[in-house]
Structure formats: structure tokens, C-alpha cells
Image (cartoon, rainbow, N blue to C red):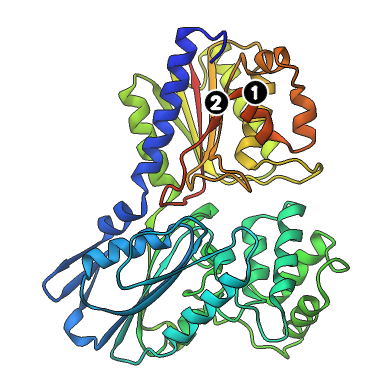
């Protein structure tokens, strides 16, 4: 906070409280309890009612950064009825569970523990009979935390595929299309394994548009993507010569009909399946909006669908903030702009950072010397890329303070090295694991 006015310090505090209010609204336990409740032998799941007395066994499975916290809420609702369960969570994202086993595994690059967890999940749901209920808990990170390669593909092959896709700037939709078509559990195959049991999936959405077949690579829903689309993505990013040979061989075989496509809409395996989104980016945005109004700001929600290159998105947000300063359009001051979604970073350097940290750094450069603007960008899961930070907060003084400390913001940005930049300025947003993951929140305040 060095050399900042009290007004700017107050705005920065407002920004952090607005962000945290959005995160709190979509915590896993709140999300589950908002959509699920029990009354005697009736389990209410959204608009559906399940008669618990007709189920012999109840299995709980899941994957994602918030899956353990979701499982804890389910155990509160069904304290004695769960027969067995297993969830795959990111390291240090565990919860105090009594009936559901939890396996800590790698994210965003999958590891052997994730593969073991995925195999345990698949083996458990394969036990389901027509008189059994399977509760599946899915949240952001589920794809990486449930890696079960298709026959002929090794875990190392999928790890390398994930690294290449993350580095080239592919969207989450594109990444998950390839994940589904190189997996034995995603793209509806978990639902296939659970049939003929009743399958209920509770889902925290971490993808643009809340597309069910994209969240965690859609393990319990019909898949709308194809092997043909997978190869088109490979061609788009010129990955054919870089991807492991077993991955390319499997995708090519699928395109030629020698490997079965993922289950599609209309398949009988989905007749006893319920998929319900219990938390989304827009819910977090609405809660952030309410907190901003409570703090005296006029609010404008830009979009929950922001994607594309992080730096371009940052410049766009900065331009709107500067327009408000100049003309009080599109909203009069004091103003709060809120957006969500998930941008991408095309790696050019070898630094340490993430999309939110890079957004904040690019935004800081854009608003330098434009007083009375504060911008925060943070991941609702509490971690941005490979860092322990959720994101960062900046204002018009950030670049000046950095320069006084001998830090060249432009060089840090070009090297994708935003984390150490903000660490030295003490501008990181540190929340720790948040028990949720519904993409990102960006808060722009103009006094």
C-alpha cells in the first residue's frame, strides 16, 4: 500500500470484499445444500424427488478441486446411508470425511494418483445395479483429477498432451474434447459404467456457458464432440508432430471407426441419469454485484462468458474503466464493473504466473497514471495456474511503485512472470483452497 491515498486503499479493500462475497456464494457446501435436501425417505435434488427406500446401496464418487467439500455436504444429508465412496481431489484440498475415501492427485497436469483414483471410481460405479443410487460430485479440475487413459494410451502420454494443450492457448472446450476422446471414463463413459443404476450428478460449473458435456470432460452426460473434431483441434494448433504417437494413433483410429465413439444423446444409458448444476460463475457474479451495491457502487455486469487472450481482455476492461473516468459511460461513478469466464494465456516466456495474475499485470500497465481505478482478477478456486495465489489487485499507482522498486512491468509481462512481480509488491490475493471452482471473477472499481 506504499504511497497510496486513503481513498485508493479503501477501494482496494472494497474490491477484495466484493471478490470474496462472490466466492462465498458458490462454496461447495452452500451449493449442495441449496439444491439438495432430505425429508425422511425423500431426497430432493433440484426439481426431482428420489425415494431412498427403494435403493439397496448408495455410492458416492467424484472428482474436482471441490469434490471433497461437496462429499462432506452429502455426508451431512445422508449420514448413515452411504455404502461406499471415493473422490479425487487436488493436493491439500481434502475435507473431514467419514464414509467417502479421498485421493489427493495432481492438477492441472494429471499424475499416477489421479489415475488410481479414476480406476477406483470406475470400478465402484460398475458395481451399481438397478436398485442402487450413484451420486457423482463434479467440480472444476475434474478432468485432470480423473485421468484414466483409453486402451493403448499411457498416463505419460496424457500428461504430455495436457502440457501441450495448456501451453498452446487452447480453450477449455478444446482441451476437454481431446481429453474425452483419449479417456476410458470421460465423455459419458462414467454414466455408461453406472448403468443400470440411478445416477445423479451434482456439478459446480467451471466452463464458459455451463456446457455439461465440457465440465470435467462430461463423464456423466452425452458427448456432443467427435473424434473428427479432436483431430481438427490438433491441426489448428499444429500438434500432430508434437503429440505422443499413441494419442495420435488412437484419435486417427476413432476417426476411421475402429474405436467406438463416446456415448451420444438418446443412448439408453442416460435414461436414469440426472445432471444438475449447483453452482456457476453467474451465481458468483450476482453475489459480488450485491456486495458492491451494499458498498455504494453502481454496478454493471459485463459478461460471464469472457474468454480469449488474457492480455486483450485486460486492455478491454481497462479501456472501459478509462471511459467511465472520461465520460461516465457506460455507467456513472462510483462504478463497479464485474465480469467472469476464463481467459487463456499463450506462453512465450518461462516465468511463473497464471491467467488472473497476467490479467492484473496487463491491466496495471493499461491504467497507469489514470487515478481512481482499481482492478482485481482472481480465480474462485483460490489458485491461479501453478501459484498459491488466487490472483492480484492493482491500481493506477502499481506501475509507479514497481518502477521505484526496480521492477520493469513490461519485461515481467513478456516473460509470463507475473507471480514474482506481484509477490514483491505484496499485491497478491491469497485465499487458500476455497472449496469451490466456478472460473474467474474480475472486479473493476472507478471512484
Q: Which residue position holds label 2?
A: 375
| Residue 42 in view (yes/no) | yes
Residue drawn 11% across the image and 72% down it: 40
SS at mark 1 in the image: helix
As displayed, is residue 396 above or below residue 258? above
Residue drawn 73% across the image and 51% down it: 169
Horizontal side of 6 relative to 424 (left or right) equals left
Q: Which circle's residue, 1 or 2, is located before the other in the chain? A: 1
Residue 170, quarter of picture: bottom right
Callout 1 crowding tier (Cα within 10 Å): few <14, some 14–19, many ≥20: many
**The one of 79 and 436 positioned closer to us in this rendering:** 79
SS at mark 2 in the image: strand
Residue drawn 79% across the image and 43% down it: 350
Q: Position of residue 183 (x, y in %)?
A: 62, 77
| Residue 266 in view (yes/no) | no
Horizontal side of 381 relative to 115 (left or right) equals left
Horizontal side of 310 relative to 383 (left or right) equals right
Identity of the residue furthest to the right in this view: 241
Residue 425, quarter of picture: top right
Q: Which residue position holds label 1?
A: 364
Q: Position of residue 307 (x, y in %)?
A: 62, 45
Identity of the residue furthest to the left in this view: 40
Q: Are marks 1 and 2 in contact (CB under 8 Å)?
A: yes
**The one of 341 and 381 positioned closer to us in this rendering:** 381
Residue drawn 70% across the image and 71% down it: 158
Q: Say which mark, if any, is on residue 233.
A: none
Q: Position of residue 187 (x, y in %)?
A: 56, 75
Amino acid at each position: 500500500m506504499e504511497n497510496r491515498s486513503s481513498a485508493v486503499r479503501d477501494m482496494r479493500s472494497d474490491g477484495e470484499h466484493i471478490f470474496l462475497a462472490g466466492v462465498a456464494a458458490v462454496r461447495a457446501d452452500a451449493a449442495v445444500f441449496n439444491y439438495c435436501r432430505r425429508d425422511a425417505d425423500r431426497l430432493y435434488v433440484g426439481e426431482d424427488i428420489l425415494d431412498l427406500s427403494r435403493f439397496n446401496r448408495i455410492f458416492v464418487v467424484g472428482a474436482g478441486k471441490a469434490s471433497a467439500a461437496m462429499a462432506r455436504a452429502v455426508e451431512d444429508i445422508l449420514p448413515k446411508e452411504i455404502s461406499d465412496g471415493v473422490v479425487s481431489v487436488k493436493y491439500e484440498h481434502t475435507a473431514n470425511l467419514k464414509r467417502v475415501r479421498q485421493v489427493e492427485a495432481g492438477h492441472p497436469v494429471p499424475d499416477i494418483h489421479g489415475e488410481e483414483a479414476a480406476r477406483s471410481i470406475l470400478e465402484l460405479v460398475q458395481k451399481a445395479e438397478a436398485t442402487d443410487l450413484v451420486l457423482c460430485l463434479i467440480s472444476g479440475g475434474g478432468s485432470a483429477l480423473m485421468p484414466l487413459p483409453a486402451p493403448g494410451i499411457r498416463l505419460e502420454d496424457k500428461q504430455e498432451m495436457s502440457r501441450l494443450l495448456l501451453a498452446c492457448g487452447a480453450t477449455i472446450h478444446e482441451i476437454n474434447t481431446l481429453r474425452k476422446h483419449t479417456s476410458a471414463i470421460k465423455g459419458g463413459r462414467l454414466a455408461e459404467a453406472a448403468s443400470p443404476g440411478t445416477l445423479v450428478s451434482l456439478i459446480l460449473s467451471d466452463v464458459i456457458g455451463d456446457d455439461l458435456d465440457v465440465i470435467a470432460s462430461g463423464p456423466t452426460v452425452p458427448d456432443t464432440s467427435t473424434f473428427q473434431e479432436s483431430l481438427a483441434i490438433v491441426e489448428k494448433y499444429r500438434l500432430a508432430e508434437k503429440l505422443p504417437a499413441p494419442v495420435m494413433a488412437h484419435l486417427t483410429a476413432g476417426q476411421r471407426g475402429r474405436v467406438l465413439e463416446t456415448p451420444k444423446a438418446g443412448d439408453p444409458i442416460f435414461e436414469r441419469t440426472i445432471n444438475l448444476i449447483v453452482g456457476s460463475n453467474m451465481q458468483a457474479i450476482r453475489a459480488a454485484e450485491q456486495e458492491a451495491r451494499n458498498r455504494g457502487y453502481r454496478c454493471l455486469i459485463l459478461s460471464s462468458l469472457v474468454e480469449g487472450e488474457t492480455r486483450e481482455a485486460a486492455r478491454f476492461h481497462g479501456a472501459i474503466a478509462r471511459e467511465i473516468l472520461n465520460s461516465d459511460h457506460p455507467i456513472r461513478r462510483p462504478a463497479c464493473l464485474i465480469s467472469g469466464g476464463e481467459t487463456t494465456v499463450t506462453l512465450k516466456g518461462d516465468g511463473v504466473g497464471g491467467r488472473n495474475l497476467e490479467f492484473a499485470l496487463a491491466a496495471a500497465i493499461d491504467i497507469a497514471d489514470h487515478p481512481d481505478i482499481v482492478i482485481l482478477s482472481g480465480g474462485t478456486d483460490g489458485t491461479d495456474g501453478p501459484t498459491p495465489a488466487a490472483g492480484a489487485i492493482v491500481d493506477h499507482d502499481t506501475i509507479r511503485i514497481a518502477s521505484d522498486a526496480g521492477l520493469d512491468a513490461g519485461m515481467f509481462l513478456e516473460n509470463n512472470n507475473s507471480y514474482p512481480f506481484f509477490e514483491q509488491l505484496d499485491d497478491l490475493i491469497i485465499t487458500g483452497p476455497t472449496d469451490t471452482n466456478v472460473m474467474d471473477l474480475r472486479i473493476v472499481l472507478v471512484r
